[in-house]
Image (spheres, helix red, strand yellow):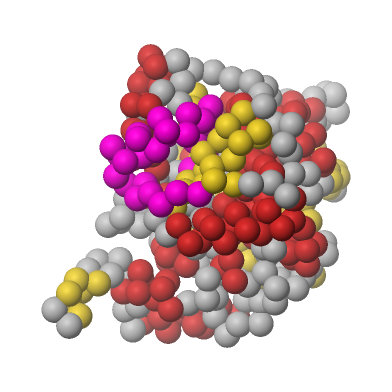
């Protein structure tokens, strides 16, 4: 049984804390902190109502390292679970090092002033965590996270090598809004509007944002347009699977989303550089995020399913030649809301955050340094996915994808 400190109070955090409270044999004491304590209090009330478990709440600026260190020393957790914004990763890691506690997050570091995210900043912390005898586990969400574990499970049980890999992320839900993002608006729009990158023949190839589109028939959803874009697990997957010839990431977007986003780009509302407004510096994208519906508010109205998985082609473990496998999870927005009060996009990230935390605090995944999900044994994580609301399925396809 372990004490954990969760940082952040959005939809993902809400799901993670609810699921931790449902597993008291693993998480004996749960503490929750964010810049806005009232958000933490709202999550704590929901957790109390649903599970009877008390969650302690605090106000904290995650970018203020001394304040973070003081809070960690006060709570004395065995793990800090960072579910805040990606550009807060490094200060939270600094605080964990100073306070002597393990670290976990769901998304890699991204500078505030540049829409670019990569692992180099966090990988550079490896020796510091190793020398301190601490573990930092990166990317324990769905993508990154589960998609990486899916890939390594296939490599352990089905494929000797992986030649081609495609990650397909489909949200087939309808939230009833003219325009809204399914996770943090600022991060979502920064990702979508950045140039696409995919791994091919030993290097990353950059193409225009939303420049390549396919149509794919997703089980539980139907046919959807999916756009190639860059996602951080491509970097770690390429590192830990050097035989990869090609790896791509695809995400579905509806026509209305694309139309609204195009207009917002054209009028400058997705800019991340500051502008003067009434004598003050404001960042247009942050202002836009403030006026858009909050993802955690969409749970009650969102209907339908998500379908997220990977298609991998490579040399079969049994020596039968090249084979292609598709492994995925289908998650119901309605079921996610009934259990935790959040929609499935938050659920599919919050549950893996809880499972990754369980892996660390129970020493099923252990090490000294900074680690990605690909470096860990996939089996216990995969077992917990089946047990805690994200069951997966795997099937063999006739051949490699034709897109």
Q: Position of residue 300 (x, y in %)?
A: 70, 73
Quarter holding the N terminus is top right
Residue sticking out furthest to the left:
279
Q: Residue at x 29, y 44 (%)?
A: 64
Q: Is residue 201 above or below residue 298?
A: above
Whether residue 122 appears in this view of the structure is no
User: Viewed as shown, does residue 268 lie left or right of 119?
Assistant: left
Q: Residue at x 64, y 47 (%)?
A: 54
Percent of width and height locating residue 218: 77, 63
- 127 vs 260, left or right, is left
Horizontally, is 75 left or right of 247 in the view?
left
Q: Look at the image and tell me whether residue 56 can be seen.
A: yes
Q: Position of residue 79 (x, y in %)?
A: 53, 31
In-front residue for pair 107/246: 107
Q: Quadrant of residue 226?
A: bottom right
Instruction: Locate residue 97 relative to residue 168 in the image: left or right.
Output: left
Residue depicted at 58% across the width and 32% down the height: 3
**Residue pictured at 77% horizontal, 36% vertical:** 384
Residue 246 magenta: no
Which quadrant is home to the C terminus?
Answer: bottom right
Q: Which range is magenta?
A: 57-84
Above or below, comparing residue 131 to residue 344 in the picture:
above
């Amino acid at each position: 049984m372990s004490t954990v400190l969760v940082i952040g109070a959005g939809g993902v955090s809400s799901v993670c804390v609810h699921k931790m409270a449902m597993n008291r044999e693993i998480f004996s004491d749960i503490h929750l902190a964010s810049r806005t304590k009232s958000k933490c209090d709202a999550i704590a009330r929901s957790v109390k109502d649903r599970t009877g478990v008390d969650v302690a709440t605090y106000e904290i600026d995650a970018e203020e390292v001394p304040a973070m260190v003081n809070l960690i020393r006060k709570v004395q957790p065995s793990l800090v679970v960072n579910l805040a914004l990606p550009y807060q990763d490094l200060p939270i890691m600094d605080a964990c090092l100073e306070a002597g506690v393990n670290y976990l997050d769901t998304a890699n570091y991204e500078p505030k002033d540049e829409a670019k995210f990569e692992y180099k900043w966090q990988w550079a912390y490896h020796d510091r965590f190793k020398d301190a005898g601490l573990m930092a586990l990166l990317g324990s969400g769905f993508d990154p996270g589960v998609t990486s574990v899916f890939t390594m499970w296939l490599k352990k049980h089905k494929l000797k090598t992986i030649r081609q890999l495609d990650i397909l992320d489909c949200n087939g839900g309808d939230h009833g809004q003219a325009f809204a993002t399914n996770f943090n608006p600022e991060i979502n729009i920064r990702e979508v509007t950045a140039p696409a990158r995919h791994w091919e023949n030993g290097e990353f190839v950059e193409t225009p944002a939303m420049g390549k589109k396919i149509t794919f028939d997703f089980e539980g959803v139907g046919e959807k347009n999916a756009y190639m874009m860059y996602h951080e697990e491509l970097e770690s997957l390429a590192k830990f699977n050097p035989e990869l010839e090609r790896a791509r990431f695809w995400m579905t977007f509806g026509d209305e989303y694309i139309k609204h986003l195009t207009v917002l780009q054209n009028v400058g509302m997705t800019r991340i550089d500051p502008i003067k407004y009434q004598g003050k510096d404001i960042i247009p994208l942050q202002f836009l995020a403030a006026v858009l519906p909050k993802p955690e508010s969409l749970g009650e109205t969102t209907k339908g399913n998500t379908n997220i998985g990977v298609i991998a082609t490579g040399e079969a473990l049994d020596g039968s030649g090249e084979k292609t496998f598709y492994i995925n999870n289908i998650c119901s927005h309605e079921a996610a809301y009934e259990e935790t009060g959040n929609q499935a996009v938050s659920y599919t990230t919050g549950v893996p955050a809880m499972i990754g935390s369980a892996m660390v605090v129970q020493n099923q995944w252990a090490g000294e340094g900074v680690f990605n999900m690909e470096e860990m044994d996939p089996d216990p994580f995969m077992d917990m996915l089946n047990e805690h609301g994200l069951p997966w399925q795997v099937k063999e396809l006739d051949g490699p994808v034709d897109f």
